[in-house]
Image (tube, rainbow, N blue to C red):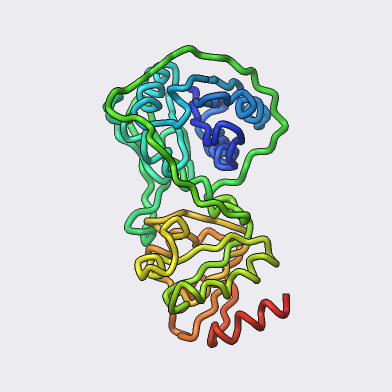
Amino acid sequence: MTVLVYAEHDNQQLKSETHKLVTAASKMSSDVQILVAGKGCAYVAQQAAKIAGVSKVLVADSADYEYQLAENIGDLVTELATGYTHIAAAATTTGKNFMPRVAALLDVAQISDVIAVESEDTFVRPIYAGNAIATVQSSDTKKVLTVRASAFDAADESGAASVESIDILKVSEKSAFVSAELTESERPELTAAEVIISGGRGMQNGENFSLLNGIADKLGAAIGASRAAVDAGFVPNDMQVGQTGKIVAPQLYIAVGISGAIQHLAGMKDSKIIVAINKDEEAPIFQVADYGLVGDLFEILPELEGAL
């Protein structure tokens, strides 16, 4: 059995999700290989080769893969699938975009949001917005999985895998890259941050999110938000943490003015330490919090920043 792991990267830097994917893949098989598809991504391949437990890195370097369009990558992975029993990608925007296409083309069922691996054919995943955990056994000859990387520890970089170039080109006429509008921030990206402070509907408006800035700066934290805050127009949706936003599992998660709706808890309850600040002592967030502070956030936040 051999597992093919799709590498998350931006053509310059390998993302931490890949290290965690390798940990998950190692529980399925002792033979783990990584696919790096992009343009000018040789350095990314070198980084992938250092991950412990990886036997080989395949590099598809072409302008056709620069933006990792779902049609192109889906066709590429499907052709490569012949030599693998398992294909795994992170349950991120990229993985959720192309992996269902791979499963459909291979005529197998995709297993999504895997949070634990029990054996080569048995996996654990949350359902009903995390309210229940399902153990799923697949009888398909090829297992196609998206993995919730936050549920696994990152593999170290003590490896020395071989790097092999492949010349398979897949180009779809159905879609083309037009442009990208990226949010620039000096703070860490949400899914990679060790510390996150998030605001909810209790922040009352977008201007009040500035109260989080000083604390985030002192802690080196990313700033997130609940779906309620995003839907209310307080902050842009790329800050949303939750089942329909970004799944995070930092070392420290501070929830400010967040009641703790099911979909939000599903996106952050794997955080190592959870701190909740809310004036409602009955708020569901306190059921998962390691530390809870009941009070007015507009008084508490300035005091917390001063103390830090």
Which quadrant of the rendered structure holds the C terminus?
Answer: bottom right
Q: Nearer the viewer, residue 106 or 297?
A: 297
Residue drawn at x 46%, y 74% is 258
| Above or below: residue 203 compared with residue 147 | below
Q: Residue furthest top?
A: 167
Q: Is residue 40 left or right of residue 145?
A: right
Residue drawn at x 52%, y 36% is 8
Residue 100 drawn at (x, y percent): 32, 35
Q: Nearer the viewer, residue 122 or 272?
A: 272
Q: How many marks?
A: 0
Residue drawn at x 55%, y 63% is 223
Residue 217 drawn at (x, y percent): 67, 65
Q: Nearer the viewer, residue 29 or 49?
A: 49
| Above or below: residue 16 compared with residue 35 | below
| Above or below: residue 295 compared with residue 92 | below
Residue 286 drawn at (x, y percent): 50, 76
Residue 266 drawn at (x, y percent): 43, 60
| Above or below: residue 287 compared with residue 113 | below
Residue drawn at x 52%, y 55% is 248
Q: Can residue 60 be seen by looking at this rendering?
A: no
Q: Is residue 236 left or right of residue 31?
A: left
Q: Can residue 236 be seen by looking at this rendering?
A: yes
Asked where in the image residue 97 lies, by quadrant, the reply is top left
Asked where in the image residue 10 lies, by quadrant, the reply is top right
Q: Is residue 131 left or right of residue 189?
A: left
